[in-house]
Image (cartoon, helix red, strand yellow):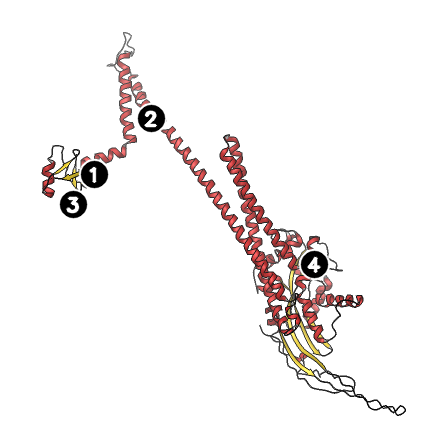
Amino acid sequence: MKPACLKAKMKKTKQPDRAQAPQRGSNSPDACDNKDGNESSEKGGATHQISQNYNDKHDMEQNDSTDGVSKETASTDRTYERVALYMPYLTFGKCYRDDAKDGEADKNCRDKYQQLLDAYKEKIIHGSRTFDQFYYDSMSDMKGRDASQVVTRALTNHHSGDGIETEPWWPILAVDQLWLWVIDEETIVTCSTHRRDGLADPVVERIWNYLREKKGKGKGQPPPSSVDEMSRFIVNFCTSFVNETSWEASISGRPQGTCSVVETQSSRKSPREIFAETINKKADDEKEMFRGFKEKMRLKKDESEAQDQTHRTILNQQEETQNWQSISKAATVLNEVKDVLDELNILRAALMQQQSVWNELFKGGAELKSERAPTYTIQQIDEMTKITEAIQLSVKDILGLEQNGINIIEAFLSRGQAKESIQQGKTLMVFTVITIFFVPMSFLTSLFALNVSSFQHDPQNNLIYEPGWIFPIIFCTSIGLGLVIIFFAFYFDYARKTWNHFVKGGDGGGPVVSHTTSTTSLAQKAHGSVVSYSQPPEVLEKKSGGEGMWRLGFNQKRAPYHIV
């Protein structure tokens, strides 16, 4: 940030009537090199002061020969400060849907703006910036951010800018620039950003109206009486826009076209009040979300106690719908809370630049700690930021609770599905067992239905069997074969391990010891001592890594022993 260059020479002059104003030449503020003006306008505010005491003494002599009055001398001392400053200030503006109009309210405004561009083709034109453009130099979604400002949502009752871009225009918060020069003890020059939306210049019209009302009432605080008081009054007035200006006051007496999206109640509030009201609404939304979560937990309790399957299904459908609604609402609230935090940060950046100008302009004055100073507003913004951050954490906690609740529900559903799978498995097992028994029966029945000569026949050569002969064959064979098949079906792994154990001689393929093997002989070979066992082992193996430790190879169980 670089302040504008200012070069001036101050001279003491004497005049019979009043002090002569300094000559405006190459060293006057009008001849300043303003090459850094664009950078200063874009980056913020600064102030530069040059103080010079003017001791203008003039003597007035009056001779009256008739009355014989002697000479009378009067002297006056005047002191003022030459000031050159530039500072951002907040105001309301319009954002237009059609970019081809370049934000102009009507053709007359567009023509005037084009004349301004033509007159200063090679100069820098400081246009009005939206709230986000003031902080972010360039962003691809700037149009969307302008449509979702906190002020825009409050004035249009649209959430996150949804549907607002279908309107011909919508209200936004803008950041304009103030330039002020104190030329001499009677002259102040002020400039402000050109408005492209047809709204009134708040610096000129509002200050003029304020002074006119003060003069008409003739009471209260007197109007400024010097250039120092006037310059401070203008700066004070611009810094108070965030606390005092409103959309209704900004559009007073101006035609607004065909748009009817502005909400009346919020249009009477200042930007700071709109931010505070928005934060309160987000706090209410957070409380409502927590209440909804508790209601879902109550429904879940009713579901667990419900015995009727139809009632339970209805509760499950309601719960699923509420889950999606809660997550959608939480995401919307969290997005809006993040927007509030972002814009509070932008607002604080603008106020910090105003505070820098304020501190330099009111250095050593009583107004430095006034409630109208930017410092007081910055403290309020910091408090709102803390509250908003607390709301953001609460919303995230509620989202965490929602996620945990969904996980618990999924766990219950998984457990129910597991139970159903087990039940289906048992049912399938029953059908499998029945099938195992009836398949051999079907096979044998089909076999004995064949007209084989060796089968029993009657005198007419028809197949006929004695019950005592055919039924034992069919049923006993089916039952015996079914038991063998069932055993291998349910104990196949165990049978395979047992078979491998006998074939390979245990786990490691060691020698198999029969029951008649002398335990004493085997132990003496290993340790030279006698080992007695409480039960006869089928297989004894020396376990690696442990001396005196023995293991039953067949059933994989350790047998107690003691050395004699």
Identify the image quadrant of residue 34.
bottom right
What residue would you read off at disc 3? Answer: 547
Label 4 vs 1, first from the N-terminus: 4
Label 4 vs 3, first from the N-terminus: 4
Q: In the rendered view, does 489 fall on the left or right side of 115?
A: left
What is the secondary structure assignment of the residue under circle 1? Answer: loop
Q: In the rendered view, does 433 fall on the left or right side of 202?
A: left
Q: Assign the N terminus to one quadrant of the image.
A: bottom right
Q: Which mark is residue 558?
A: 1
Mark 1 to mark 3 CA distance (whole Å): 14 Å
Q: Amino acid at mark 3?
A: Glu
Out of 110 and 530, give the one closest to the viewer: 530
- Residue 347, x across and y down, in percent: 60, 62
What is the secondary structure assignment of the residue under circle 4? Answer: helix
Q: Amino acid at mark 4?
A: Trp
Mark 2 to mark 1 CA distance (whole Å): 37 Å
What residue would you read off at disc 4? Answer: 247
Label 3 vs 2, first from the N-terminus: 2
Q: Which mark is residue 433?
A: 2
